[in-house]
Amino acid sequence: MERYDLLYRLYEDHEADSLKAYQDLVDLFPPVDSRVALEHWERASDELDRRKSEIRAGFPDGAYAEVAAHATREQAFTALDLHSKHGRGVNVFVLDVDETLRSAGDTDNEIPRETLSLLTEFHEDGVPIVICTGQTLENVKGFMIQGLGSEIVHSGELSIVYEAGTGVFTPGHGADTKHLLYEDLDEGIVSVFDDVRSRVLREAPEELRRGCHLQGNEFNVTMKPNFEIGSEEAIEIIDDALVYELGLLGEAVAEVADADVDPDAAGGFARAFYADSDPEIRDVLEERGSPPEVDPEEVPEALADYFDRIDVAYYEGDAAEIGSLELNKVVGVEAALDVLAVEDPFALVMGDSKSDLRVMEWVAEEGSGIGAAPEHASEDVLEHVRGADELVFGPGRSADMLRTVYALNRLVSLD
């Protein structure tokens, strides 16, 4: 109980809120060419040092001063609870981007400066970062360089798992820099994706060609709306895109599997299979007038064997996607950790979707990490996170979790 008592005293006897405000000002002060501004920053820095010195004089280790300067009382006690439960600090981050590090509704779709500043501090402490996203590599590289800077991105301590696990990019590692994980799939699966990708826009009805575009993925086939995401027009066009993609997928699988199935029937088998596995897909098919017309038990085994390895994902008003179930964020993260040489990981996994949940479940099963999610995450994700360590944060507040981990790691350093 000694550390709990020390934390109580730390936050009772010292103005931690104002101390943290000084730390934030020093860390986040924008670079401006102004003597007045520089003098203001220097006064804040001096006051921060003075207040930290007062804490250091009254506590057995300087780590307490850093905890108070970076974490709120609630975050510090959450960190101590995590320490008591897991007995370890976080030694690698696995971070989703959209609606996790950044939230379109609250941060203008940019990663907040507070979050970037904290990630920079963790990087300086030697904690590797794995950015784990469904986005394309070029998109991720662009905004990570803009946010964290080229030096960190190319430091050899940052890895990008892109397109939800189809590839891993880790600058600074020579021949191991880029891993195209989809190249390890068998020829039949690759042929299915090549076939669907080559036909998806070329053979689409005119309304779909005008209303959708193909996201620039290396492997996954992702149709995106040419309308504002989530709008009525986007919902309608993505619903139609899902129906269309399932038809193409059925035909491509029938061709590769060399199944004696009529092309029109092949699409019906695909709709039946995926409607049976995902109620949301079933609802869309019924609403768009293309309900499954066969029982899922009637799907030929040759087709079902392929469908079992292929994921069809539907995101209302956002995307209709075909991906490989053998390529996911877990596979990508494993590859990234291998390149980064993180041999005994204890990760903070932050995310909001089912693909992130797989990583959270994996680290939980392995005893190699903890999961955190925004309060608007999918219900499955929130159920897992609340049942584990209750690490839920508000929209655009990814920094809250990083502050908690900062406090955790400082407390663990006292062991």
Image (cartoon, grey):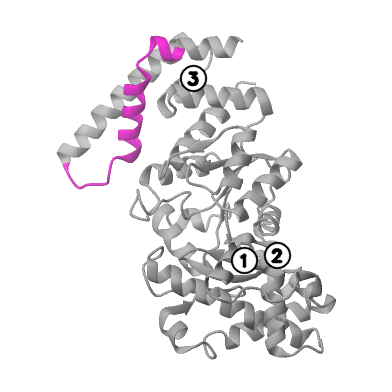
Q: Nearer the viewer, residue 79 or 342?
A: 79
Type of secondary structure dominating the magenta stretch: helix
Q: Percent x, y for residue 67?
A: 47, 24
Picture coordinates of residue 320, whole percent (x, y): 54, 70
Q: Judging from the image, what secondary structure is the residue with disc 3 in?
A: helix
State the separation of the CA atoms marked 2 and 1.
7 Å
Q: Amino acid at mark 2?
A: Asp
Identify the amino acid type marked 3. Tyr
According to the image, label 1 marks what residue?
282
Residue range highlighted in magenta: 10-34
On screen, residue 308 versus residue 48, left or right, reads right
State the residue position of label 2: 276
Task: Answer above or below: position of 204 versus 218.
Answer: below
Residue furthest right in the image: 301
Q: Earlier in the sequence, mark 3 or mark 2?
A: 3
Residue 202, percent across and down? Answer: 53, 90
Amino acid bearing label 1: Arg
Residues at marks 3 and 2, CA–CA distance in whole angstroms = 54 Å
Q: Residue at x 54, y 54 (%)?
A: 155
Locate residue 24 relative to residue 367 in the image: left or right.
Answer: left
**Whether residue 127 can be seen here:** no
Circles 3 and 1: CB distance less than 8 Å? no
Query: Which residue is at 68% across, 56% downward?
Result: 339
Q: Which quadrant: the N terminus?
A: top right
| Residue at image mark 3 | 64
Crowd band around label 3 with a 10 angstrom C-alpha radius: few (<14), some (14–19), many (20+)? many
Instruction: Nearest to the eye among marks 3 and 2: give it.
Output: 2
Corner quadrant of residue 85? top right
Callout 2: SS = helix
Mark 3 vs 1, N-terminal side: 3
